[in-house]
Image (cartoon, rainbow, N blue to C red):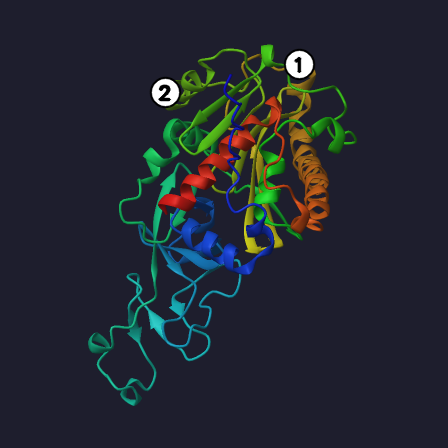
Amino acid sequence: MKPQVPTPSPFTNWPDALIDPGCFRDEQTRLARVWTFLGFTHYVAKDGDWFRATIATRSVFVQRFGDELRGFENRCAHRSFPLRNADRGNGPIVCAFHGWRYDKDGKAAEIPESSAFVSPVLSELAARIIPIEIDTCGALIFGRFAAPGGPALRPYLGVSFDILAAISNTSAAPRFVTQTVEANWRLCFHANVEDYHSPVVHSRTLGTTGYPQPAHTNYFRFGWHSAFFSDPDPDALTTMEADCRNGRWRSNNYRVFQLFPDLTVSHVRAHWGNWFIVLVQYAPLSPNRSIMRAWHYPAPFPTQHRPAWYDLMTRPLTNRLRQFIMTYAVKMVLNEDNAVCERQQSIAQQLSPAPILGALEERLAWYEEAYAEAMRVS
């Protein structure tokens, strides 16, 4: 009888990328070429509007020029001063250090005292800020640094593209909360991509009703991404895709999408028949620090079942209150996850390179397999 060969762990660079600056830099260099969520089109509704974001620790900004959206690294070509020093704004691209002005193509269009440079003619100087690739899925804006041969956004998101386009169809700008987390971004994302911890970590906020039951749930894997549906139908994902594409989908149960590298999109019931969309992103800052960004807004779908009369009658009042309560609830739940991740980061150098994963952590294993592939091909 042949000896049983252990299944190799899918965890790549673990836990080195959580503690080693060199390993972390290499990781981020590769992830900079992966489509990353940047923000909502609501933030760039008017000509000249811009907002700041990050891709793999690199500061970037997205700006509207007429009917076009353009994205650039947030760094002046002259002396690398940040061009955008607030989260959002409106106006031309002008460096606040020496006054260099850039056009919509990122080229230097005006340089004070340009005759002082070796090449006083702008066309010869060829100074420009680094562009990033931009694409949209509904109201969601994604970006990446140049990735020759990499897939376009639609094939990258796969079956989730039409779903996300429908989910993001909200008229009002989402409410936003953020927090710095003293833990690696990958540790933080792990807490969002498995269902084993909830009755322990979220007993105060979500209750101790138990673990998801296989008979009532489904896990789906598509490309580098995954999803969890509280729906026993094995075809629920493809059905939802078709219904969203045709405008027929109705809010009816809990669903969550994990989009590589760092975004979670959830469809949750907040109160009675009222459903919300919650997006959570853990953007890396350093090996042991991340920035949590979370957005929430009412789900843009009718409910599958007609709401109760008392719900309909009180909605003019409760909808306003519910938005504030939802902000508080999102903070509470995420704070519980973040506290666990910070405690785990405190002993990052002791983490096992091959964690023991159970059935409720299957999507975590899928995520790490995607991560390993990204480290190979990016």
| Circle 2 or circle 1, nearest the eye | 2
**Could you tell me which secondary element the residue under label 2 belongs to?**
loop
Which one is in front, 11 or 228?
11
Give x and y (percent) for residue 17. 55, 51
**Which residue type carries mark 1?**
Trp
User: Of callouts 2 and 1, which one flags the residue occurring earlier in the amino acid sequence?
Assistant: 2
User: Which quadrant of the figure has residue 223?
Assistant: top left
Q: In the rendered image, is residue 55 in sight? A: no
The residue drawn where x is 30% and y is 89% is: 116
Q: Please identify the quarter of the rendering in which residue 270 is found.
A: top right
Q: Secondary structure at mark 1?
A: helix
Q: Considering only vertical position in the picture, is 242 above or below 317?
A: above
Q: Which residue of the protein is positioned furthest toward the right in this rendering?
A: 204
| Residue type at tag 2 | Asn
Given residues 7 and 263, the one toward you in this image is 7
Residue contact between numbered discs 2 and 1, judged by CB atoms under 8 Å: no
- Who's the residue at 27% across and 88% down the image? 115
Tell me what residue is drawn at x 32 percent, y 49 percent: 147
* Mark 2 to mark 1 CA distance (whole Å): 29 Å
Nearer to the camera, 249 or 202: 202
The picture quadrant where one finds residue 264 is: top right
Residue 273 lies left or right of residue 245; in this view the side is: right
Q: Measured from the top left, where is residue 319 in percent x and y?
A: 65, 31
Q: Position of residue 159 (x, y in %)?
A: 39, 26
Q: Say above or below: 228 vs 350.
A: above
Disc 1 designates what residue? Answer: 309
Q: Residue at x 64, y 14 (%)?
A: 213
Q: Which mark is residue 246?
A: 2
